[in-house]
Image (spheres, rainbow, N blue to C red):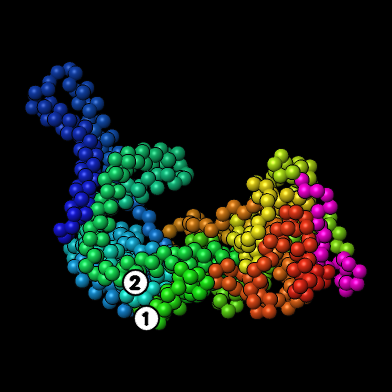
């Protein structure tokens, strides 16, 4: 156990948790003990009399009922499957150097080595207890076991406590160097020492069992009798869990303190430097998911090299940000991903798991859910995204009855043009007040929604607002400086912009609802090496961590107008779709990223002033009157 102060604190708190378990057992056995005393007294003649028989019968019935309830609660706690983090298992044959490094680290720390290693698409690392029978694959029975000859050895083997699993954040393996990863993992691996203590292990099993029992009791069930039984068991489990909460938290805090104290002897100076890389990796990973991966997931494509992409994103950040200078000099050292035999396969598996956790995509690839390489990202994601948004914008304009009449001399007068959008959004009356009327007039809003939905039922902007979408490019209207004043609720300040934003919100909400309904069908997949533990967690709860904050109508309209401008620039001025590692989809003009489009789009949708945008288009040679190609 060690001599660390935190270890003694953890053990004392673990004993407090076990005392709560013992008291609960004593309360359950108390009626039975009283019944036994009464029965023995009656048989020996010490409790004879007319009333003692009734007392013995009542107490015996209560004791049997309490024992049955206690057995039911105990079975529920013991058999409920504790929660387990979705991870990608890494077998030893696929990462022998990584396992060797972890075992050497455990030997230096004088603690048991973790039983296995798994990866998670997150910037964190921890130890996870997976000793519950439901967490492992079914153990095949040998011929000796079926005949009974090996039952004693099997039972002894099952009682042997297994070390916890080491879960490592996959971005750490690609961004950190080998020495940095070892320094970061030192306090995590040191936690296997306190975890091996019998009292702490028993307390953890009891708390995890109570937590799992509460989850089972809270899950919806069919029969009323089952609901009643589980309700009683869940009520008891909640009481016990509430009593253990403080002691369990202090126990875990003591375990962490003991692990940190023990890890001070291993790479302490390097760990201070490595912690800076942890924060940098977290910032780059979050930026990559929200700005780059999320647009691809929404288009039915999942980037298959997210971990490699975080290295490119952080390298780009180091180039742009003076605070990150010097970090790229470490790239000449050996990266931690070299500890894997096939880093590409592991990266692909963790990338698919990230798509499932953060977006809720299917478990298997298909025509509507295919991997995309970074080289194909501009064409497969950026171009398709912009043209899809532009097509949706023109469909909404068609529904609103906006004329397709173009300027004289155009080859296709009825085609979708940027001029059509700009003419519709150009203010012909002064902007409406922004303090009194924050929503469109009821009649205009109802009419706009009816045109979009084809029904007479009104839909408010709050009900129709679709899940949020992050900024799609460096040319996005809401990332650039020079924001204009508008309503606090995100509704554009002009009448036409507000109406168009409301209808776009309703249309996008319907499309995403249809996609969600199609993806609701359960998918099956087998867990194995190189794939996530899909069989051990509920697909119905996906996505576990959605990256879709609410998007206002102003942002929605700005993204669609920006997409239309980018389509016109690509079709008439030779611009190209591109990928910016920090901002996601971007428009490349003459090989350079265009970052000055945002304020001009804002002027159009919030003030109804097309002059800044027309000046930008004229400078680049973009012909707004020419039809663009849509999806």
Residue marked by disc 2: 181
SS state under label 1: loop
Q: Tell me which residue sits at (48%, 67%) in the image.
A: 284
Percent position of residue 432, x then y = 76, 45
Residue marked by disc 1: 334
- In the image, farthest residue toward the top: 50
357 relative to 229 in the view: left or right: right
Q: Magenta segment range?
A: 406-432
Q: CA distance from mark 2 to mark 1?
A: 11 Å
390 relative to 280 in the view: left or right: right
Percent position of residue 583, x then y = 58, 67
* Quarter assignment of residue 526: bottom left
Magenta stretch: includes residue 424: yes
445 over 577 or under it: above or below:
above
Quarter of the rendering occupied by the N terminus = bottom left
Q: Earlier in the sequence, mark 2 or mark 1?
A: 2
* Quarter assignment of residue 601: bottom right
């Amino acid at each position: 156990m060690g001599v660390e102060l935190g270890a003694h604190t953890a053990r004392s708190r673990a004993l407090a948790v076990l005392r709560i378990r013992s008291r609960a057992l004593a309360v359950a056995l108390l009626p039975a003990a009283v019944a036994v005393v009464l029965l023995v007294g009656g048989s020996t003649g010490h409790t004879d009399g007319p009333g003692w028989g009734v007392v013995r019968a009542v107490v015996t019935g209560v004791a049997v009922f309490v024992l049955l309830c206690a057995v039911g609660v105990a079975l529920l706690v013991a058999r409920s499957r504790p929660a387990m983090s979705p991870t990608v298992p890494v077998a030893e044959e696929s990462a022998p150097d990584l396992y060797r490094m972890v075992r050497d680290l455990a030997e230096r720390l004088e603690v048991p080595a973790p039983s296995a290693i798994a990866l998670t698409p997150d910037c964190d690392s921890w130890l996870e207890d997976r000793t519950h029978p439901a967490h492992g694959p079914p153990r095949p029975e040998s011929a000796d076991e079926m005949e009974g000859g090996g039952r004693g050895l099997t039972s002894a083997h099952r009682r042997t406590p297994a070390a916890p699993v080491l879960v490592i954040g996959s971005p750490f393996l690609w961004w950190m160097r080998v020495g940095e990863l070892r320094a970061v993992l030192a306090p995590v691996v040191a936690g296997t020492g306190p975890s091996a203590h019998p009292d702490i292990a028993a307390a953890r099993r009891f708390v995890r069992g109570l937590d799992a029992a509460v989850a089972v009791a809270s899950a919806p069930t069919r029969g009323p009798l089952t609901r009643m039984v589980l309700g009683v068991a869940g009520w008891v489990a909640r009481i016990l869990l509430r009593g253990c909460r403080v002691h369990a938290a202090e126990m875990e805090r003591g375990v962490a303190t003991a692990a940190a104290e023990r890890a001070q002897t291993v790479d302490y100076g390097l760990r201070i430097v490595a912690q800076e890389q942890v924060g940098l990796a977290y910032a780059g990973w979050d930026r990559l998911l929200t700005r780059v991966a999320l647009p691809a997931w929404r288009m039915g494509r999942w980037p298959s090299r997210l971990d490699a992409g975080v290295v490119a994103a952080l390298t780009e950040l180091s180039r742009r940000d003076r605070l990150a200078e010097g970090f790229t000099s470490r790239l000449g050292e050996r990266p931690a991903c070299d500890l894997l035999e096939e880093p590409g396969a592991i990266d692909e598996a963790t990338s698919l798991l990230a798509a499932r956790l953060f977006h809720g995509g299917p478990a298997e690839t298909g025509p509507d859910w295919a991997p995309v390489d970074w080289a194909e990202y501009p064409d497969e994601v950026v171009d398709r995204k912009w043209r899809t948004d532009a097509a949706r914008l023109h469909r909404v304009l068609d529904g609103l009855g906006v004329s397709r009449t173009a300027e004289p001399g155009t080859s296709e007068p009825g085609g979708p043009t940027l001029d059509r959008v700009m003419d519709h959004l150009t203010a012909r009356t002064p902007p409406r007040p922004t303090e009194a009327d924050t929503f469109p007039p009821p009649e205009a809003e109802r009419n706009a929604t009816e045109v979009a939905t084809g029904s007479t039922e009104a839909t408010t902007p709050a009900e129709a607002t679709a899940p949020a979408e992050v900024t799609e490019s460096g040319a996005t209207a809401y990332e650039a400086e020079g924001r204009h004043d508008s309503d606090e609720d995100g509704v554009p300040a002009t009448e036409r912009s507000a109406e168009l934003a409301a209808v776009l919100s309703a249309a996008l909400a319907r499309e995403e609802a249809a996609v969600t309904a199609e993806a609701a069908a359960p998918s099956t997949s087998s867990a194995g090496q190189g794939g996530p533990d899909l069989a051990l967690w509920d697909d119905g709860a996906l996505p576990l961590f959605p990256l879709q904050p609410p998007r206002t109508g102003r942002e929605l309209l700005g993204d669609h107008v920006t997409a239309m401008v980018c389509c016109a620039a690509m079709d008439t001025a030779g611009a190209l779709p591109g990928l910016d590692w920090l901002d996601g989809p971007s428009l490349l003009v003459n090989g350079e990223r265009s970052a000055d489009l945002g304020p001009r789009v804002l002027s159009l949708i919030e003030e109804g002033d097309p002059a800044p945008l027309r000046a930008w288009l004229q400078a680049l040679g973009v012909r707004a009157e020419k039809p663009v190609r849509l999806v």
